[in-house]
Image (spheres, rainbow, N blue to C red):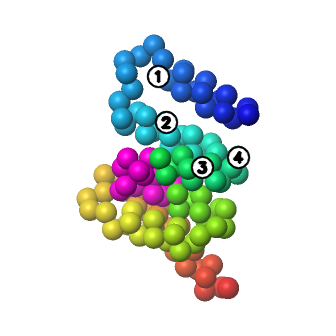
């Protein structure tokens, strides 16, 4: 598929010809892949990619937030999305405070949607 070629080309562009990729770089690449898949509404594949990151770094705030976004946008599991967001919000100390604010905002939106339903 065209996206698979794009992901391969993107990975080659970033990592070939450089020093061996560090774990952080590989995880960042997987998050980029998951974001692109989400943007193209390939939710199952996006969840698989973000799951790969979470298998290696279970408390990665960016990955947890992205998983929650995917679950919300796909409409598949709002309970699991809320659980991911709560994990981000409860992390201490959180290096990326922006992700915490995004998680709080998305959790508030989910809660508000539930109230309206």
The mark nearer the N terminus, 2 or 4, is 2
**Would you place residue 96 above or below residue 79 in this image?**
above
**Would you place residue 96 above or below residue 107 in this image?**
above
Residue at image coords 73%, 32%: 2
Q: Give the Cα separation between the discs numbered 2 and 3.
A: 13 Å
- Dot 4 lies on which element? loop
Give residue 73's position: percent from left, percent from top. Answer: 65, 62
Q: Give the Cα separation between the discs numbered 1 and 3.
A: 21 Å
Q: Give the Cα separation between the discs numbered 1 and 4.
A: 24 Å
Give residue 104's position: percent from left, percent from top. Answer: 45, 68
Q: Give the Cα separation between the discs numbered 2 and 1.
A: 10 Å
Is residue 32 visible from the viewing direction of this image?
yes
Can you identify the residue that label 4 sits on? 40
Can you identify the residue that label 3 sits on? 46
**Would you place residue 100 above or below residue 28 in this image?**
below
The mark nearer the N terminus, 2 or 3, is 2
* Other-residue count near label 2 (Cα within 10 Å), few / some / many at <14 / 14–19 / ≥20: some
Q: Are marks 3 and 4 in contact (CB under 8 Å)?
A: no
């Amino acid at each position: 598929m065209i996206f698979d070629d794009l992901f391969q080309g993107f990975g080659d562009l970033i990592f070939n010809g450089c020093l061996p990729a560090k774990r952080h770089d590989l995880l960042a690449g997987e998050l980029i892949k998951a974001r692109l898949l989400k943007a193209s509404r390939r939710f199952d594949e996006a969840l698989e990619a973000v799951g790969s990151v979470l298998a290696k770094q279970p408390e990665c705030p960016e990955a947890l937030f992205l998983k929650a976004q995917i679950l919300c946008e796909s409409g598949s599991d709002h309970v699991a999305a809320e659980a991911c967001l709560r994990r981000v919000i409860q992390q201490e100390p959180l290096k990326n405070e922006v992700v915490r604010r995004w998680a709080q905002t998305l959790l508030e939106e989910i809660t508000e949607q539930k109230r309206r339903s």
